[in-house]
């Protein structure tokens, strides 16, 4: 960690004169990327869209000793060992989102009973609860199709995949609060390593690959890339 109170140009000169290797792990607005690799925001390249579901949950207090079903080290291994699910959750609030990457076909099926897309804050999908007979308009259609034997096989299979993800991370579906769609703009730096003078500079995490679900979670995506 190196602190400097001068201009950007002075800081660049100072860093390049003192260090052989500089790691840009400074987030999506990376100073290293902009001032040492000279890659501004408008030069970030687009890789298209990434489609996902955010499966929100809230666990009751006292259910797990550490707040979440698994310790953070195991959660990290579970997240980075596959490329379907990514868990963003707080052990303090016992809440978060299980994010699930979707194909275009799955994205088109991830709707409510009333046909509306599952949109954060405006029209989230709500799960059926035990004993509920009639599906409400806001219920998540793939779950309704699966539990009532309706709809296409693809719709029912989407719900099975969601349940597989919840089981992987130890989350009971009764604690799921809502399901929302997330459409991401996949962006990445045209360069992630460059020699500047005698110094090797390279980017990691959000500075290099902006395909994360929320800021600060880029490393999970980089591992998967």
Image (cartoon, helix red, strand yellow):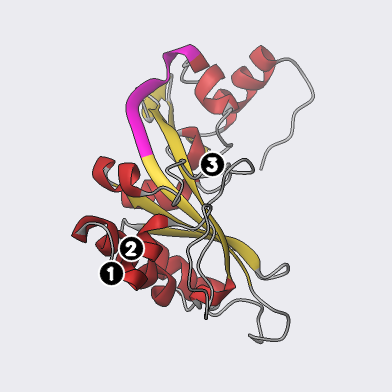
The C terminus: image quadrant? top left
Mark nearer the N terminus (2 vs 3): 3
User: At x 30% / y 59%, what residue is drawn?
Assistant: 158
Label at residue 119: 3
Relative to 1, 39 lies left or right: left
Q: Is residue 206 above or below residue 31?
A: below
Q: Quadrant of residue 44?
A: top left
Q: Is mark 1 on a helix, strand or loop?
A: loop
CA separation, marks 3 and 1? Answer: 25 Å
Q: Which of the two residues, 186 or 103, is positioned nearer the viewer here?
A: 103
Task: Please name whichever residue, 17 or 220, is drawn nearer the observer in this view of the structure.
Answer: 220
The residue positioned 55% from the left and 32% from the top of the image is 28
Q: Is residue 40 visible?
A: no
* Kind of element beneath mark 3: loop
Residue underneath mark 1 = 149
- Residue sitting at x 66%, y 78%: 67
User: In terms of secondary structure, what is the magenta stretch mainly?
Assistant: strand
Residue contact between numbered discs 1 and 2, judged by CB atoms under 8 Å: yes
Nearer the observer, 173 or 1: 173
Range drawn in magenta: 42-50
Q: Which mark identifies residue 145?
A: 2
| Whole-number angstrom distance, CA of label 2 to CA of label 3 | 20 Å
Disc 3 versus disc 1: nearer the observer: 1
Residue under the point 66% across and 87% down: 65
Q: Where is residue 46 in the image (x, y as percent from the top left)?
A: 36, 23
């Amino acid at each position: 960690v190196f602190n400097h109170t001068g201009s950007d140009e002075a800081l660049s000169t100072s860093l390049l004169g003192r260090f052989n290797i500089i790691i840009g792990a400074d987030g999506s607005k990376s100073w290293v990327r902009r001032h040492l690799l000279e890659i501004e925001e408008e030069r970030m390249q687009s890789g298209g869209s990434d489609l996902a579901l955010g499966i929100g949950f809230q666990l009751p207090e006292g259910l797990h000793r550490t707040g979440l079903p698994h310790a953070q080290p195991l959660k990290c291994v579970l997240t980075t060992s596959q490329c379907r699910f990514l868990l963003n959750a707080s052990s303090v609030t016992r809440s978060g989102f299980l994010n699930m990457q979707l194909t275009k076909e799955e994205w088109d099926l991830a709707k409510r009973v009333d046909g509306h897309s599952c949109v954060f804050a405006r029209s989230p999908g709500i799960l059926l609860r035990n004993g509920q007979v009639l599906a409400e308009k806001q219920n998540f259609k793939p779950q309704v199709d699966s539990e009532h034997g309706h709809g296409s096989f693809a719709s029912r299979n989407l719900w099975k995949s969601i349940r597989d993800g919840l089981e992987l991370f130890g989350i009971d579906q009764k604690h799921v609060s809502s399901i929302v769609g997330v459409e991401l703009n996949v962006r990445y730096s045209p360069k992630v390593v460059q020699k500047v003078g005698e110094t090797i500079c390279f980017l990691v995490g959000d500075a290099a690959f902006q395909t994360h679900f929320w800021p600060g979670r880029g490393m999970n995506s980089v591992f998967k890339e």
